[in-house]
Image (cartoon, rainbow, N blue to C red):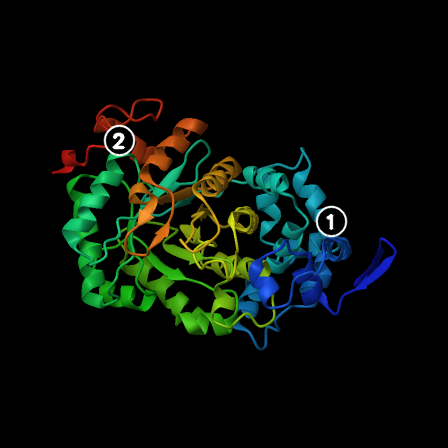
Amino acid sequence: MILKTKLAGQVYAFKNLTDVMAKANDEKSGDVLLDRAAKTVTERTAAKIVLSRVTLADIYENPLLAPEKDEVSRVLKEDLSQGIYAKIKSWTVGELRDWLLKNETRGEDIVRVSRGIEAEAAAAVTKLMTAMDLVTAASKISVPTTCATTIGLPGTLSYRNQPNHPADDLEGIKASLCEGLSYGSGDAVLGVNPVEDTVDNTLAIMNMLHDFMDKWELPTQNCVLAHVTTQMKAVEKGARVCCLFQSLAGTQPANDGFGVTAAILDEAYDCIHRFGTAPGPNLLYFETGQGSEQSIDADCGVDLMTLEARCYGLARKYRPFMLNNVSGFIGPETLYDGRQIIRASLEDHFMGKLLGIPMGMAPCYTNHTKINQDDQEMATMLLAMAGANYFMGVPVGDDVMLAYQDTSFHDDAGLRELLGRTPAPEFFAWMRKLDLMDERGRLTARAGDASIFY
């Protein structure tokens, strides 16, 4: 593995694969703050050239974090299809990029090889791609999944109805839920972030959502985004829920900080398959985002984007129903401005789909980040063109509990109309039955009136 090249009359030599991966990354404030980023555009270009000549076997045989020391690395190795990997291991990263972008390479071709692509190889090829490359390649790939209903089918665009409340008031949650449904938001999941992470509170929210689904014969799934151990205890006490949630990170120390291990995820997988109310087979919901490892000093010397790819490799083992990316949620210490958030969102969406993950996107931001509404909307439209399975639905785009900005119920409706997409089939039929959508998937005059549910 040759880790040096000559460019513009200067030789650029990199210490190891970790170094070249970090310096080939597009500029991110988190990498800069930790002194891992390229110092100049020329050095970044040199790193990309070197990386393009590295083979997939080089990456596999030189893990950035040793499996004997890092649980995530062990899962990545154990879950990789050795048979598929053996057929492509001689490809260089540059050759993988060229193959992904060829007109004759179809989505089903990419899906066939994805089980043999290691997470760090997915990160490597992404570092060589432009924004249009990332949209083009991702748009080829469909990753439909089924919990109680199916999302991610071609021609559809789904949304998580996120009716958070600053005091977990059940009637307040329900009011927001009804408004979102009246705009067609909620076919991905009815998902509440609780303020109070207790078993009884989690159980109460789960059952309220499920009761509402039963009363209105609403074809979707419910989830409460407490810690996964809290959710399992609620299920043990009789809570009715379709899927279980957990945030993931790309290193063992970071997951230790989140209070999650592979053994706990195995237990959650078993719990929801045994006691959940949805048939599946996809019954877990994960959330990730660039910079989470750096924010708790658990990055182990690896760059933001590569660690994010490792999250998808970990998630792949559990065949999730959905995975939501929130790279803009942390703030400017990881992604400084709108340009960096747009780029990171496109990277994450592509890496996830390349690894077979049903990607949902939240091109979100906190109020102390140098970004504006136009930046967020540009990210959302590009991700919709790239084929994201779903986005968030937040009242007027402002989450009053988590204090950040995300896509609104109105954005949801606008994107479907702009791209000619419809909700998931069962939910679409339900919306038409209530005269909230017409046969083209456009909202009727009745839409937006939450009082129809009261």
Residue lying at 56% horizontally and 41% vertically, measured from the top left: 138
Badge 2 amino acid: Met
Question: Residue 42: x and y, percent?
Answer: 76, 54
Label 2, label 1: how far apart the Cα atoms are: 46 Å
Image position of 122 with respect to 258: above or below: above
Amino acid under label 1? Gly
Residue 45 position in % (x across, y down): 74, 53
Q: Along the horizontal axis of the image, is 270 left or right of 181?
A: right
In this view of the protein, which residue sits in the foreground, 443 or 101?
443
Q: Residue furthest right?
A: 9
Residue under label 1: 94
Quarter where residue 36 is shown = bottom right
Q: Quadrant of the C terminus?
A: top left
Which residue position is annotated with label 2?
431
**Residue 188 seen in the current view:** no
Q: Residue furthest bottom?
A: 69
Based on the displayed image, in which of its 4 quarters is residue 90 positioned?
Answer: bottom right
